[in-house]
Image (cartoon, rainbow, N blue to C red):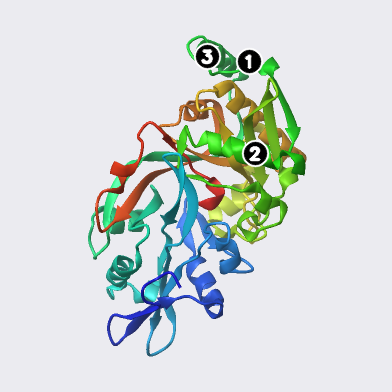
Amino acid sequence: MDSKKTQVTQNKNFVIREATLLDDQSLKNLIAVPITTRGVLLSFQREPSYFNASDVLYKKKLHFIIEDTETKNIVACYSNGYRPCYVNGEIQNIRYICDLRVDQNSRGKSLVKMVGEHVKQTMYAPNFSQLIIFNDNHAARAAVQTGKMGMPDYYDEGMIETLTLTGFKDINKISRFLQSYKTSNPECSNSDEILSCQAGPHHIALINEFIAKMANDYNFLPAYDFRELLNQHHYFRGISLSDFHLYFKDDKLVGIFGLWDQHTFKQTKILNYSLILQIFRPIYNLFAHATQRMPLPAQGDHFKYHLLHTLLCHPKDLTLHHQMILDAYQISKKHGLGIISFTLSHRDPRYTLNTFYKGEKLIGMHGFVSFEEDPRLKFDKNRIPYFEVGRI
């Protein structure tokens, strides 16, 4: 076990302990508590197993639950495992804290304070955690940013945007922008210089070298070993080597992305629509199809889209980035979807192109929590924060 204590009793009513496979159903129930947004009742589900879904988050999983000592019900949970990432060009473990949930009937019982005390006891090596909170998660923002309820200090790094892309705006405007951009950015490729192909086993060493090289430009990039992907390691659950596409310039690998379908283990399900949406959903979907917008699934179904894995190229090569986005969109369409999702830091030059793309935007904050020194002081500010949307 990684934690100093596998069980920490805070009072006579509740106990915090590390989750086991026997807690799987209780964890799924906590995560899947319905929320209403814009007339849609949603449920974030982890079927068939919460533990299987979390395989792609961590190399070392650390899930904790709060249990009612009398009823034995699971009333809260959080995760704070870690994964190897490139930090300042070197590989080190980075914790990622997420999935803080408190049962609705148990709120107001100081459970978040208990979580804070438990984090303080168990968060070491490293003694800080990476954190992402999207703007509409008001409860999490209140708990973390205000420093109340015994939570660790929060250190803001910057804003991020997850774009679920459904189409493109004026293609001519994009072309003019890229043409103008290239005049002052020699890193930007010409489209006719780039060749692409599907990844194969003979590319693995080249891909690993390329990702290590990209660590010169990006921080918090997962330290991938694509030999694990070939061997179907659970960290790559749901994606295969053939789902990756490589981009070459003068026989040198300069770009990569993978198309990742996570719906076999992670779903956003539509439980119900407001009466107005039930009536107008068919009309809206006709409009969505005509205007390249995200359609609304039938009640009981879930949203379907592809996540982009390792969306990497030189951060100033906007021509190549745009070409990869175009290709990913077209390949997704061939798979019957035509919807792709990726996350970029607002500090990433590639983020500029989001202005020209259609889709649903989710804005959030990226930062760190720690009970000790400010972890940001250790990070090279010239490197751009990298985010793997499928591991958030």
**Residue 99's disc number:** none
Residue at 68% in and 20% down: 250
The image shows residue 230, relative to residue 170, as above or below, that is: below
- Mark 3, other Cα within 10 Å: few <14 / some 14–19 / many ≥20: few
Residue at 53% in and 45% down: 388
Front residue of 165 and 240: 240
- Quarter assignment of residue 333: top right
Q: Name the residue under label 1.
A: 190
Give the amino acid type for the residue marked by disc 1 in the picture. Answer: Asn
Give the spatial CA distance, label 2 vs label 3. 24 Å
The image shows residue 271, relative to residue 329, as above or below, that is: below
Horizontally, is 323 left or right of 182 in the view? right
Total labels: the figure holds 3
Q: Mark 3 points at which residue?
A: 186
Give the amino acid type for the residue marked by disc 2 in the picture. Answer: Ile
Front residue of 243 and 125: 125
Query: Which callout, 1 or 3, points to the residue nearer the camera?
Result: 3
- Disc 3 on helix, strand or loop? loop
Residue 116 percent coordinates (x, y): 29, 66
Front residue of 262 and 21: 21
Horizontally, is 372 left or right of 321 in the view? left
- Quarter assignment of residue 5: bottom left
**Residue 207's disc number:** 2
Front residue of 300 and 224: 224
- Disc 1 on helix, strand or loop? loop
Give the spatial CA distance, label 2 vs label 1. 22 Å
Residue 80 percent coordinates (x, y): 42, 62
The image shows residue 61, relative to residue 246, as above or below, that is: below
- Quarter assignment of residue 157: top left
Residue 293 seen anywhere in this rendered image of the structure:
no
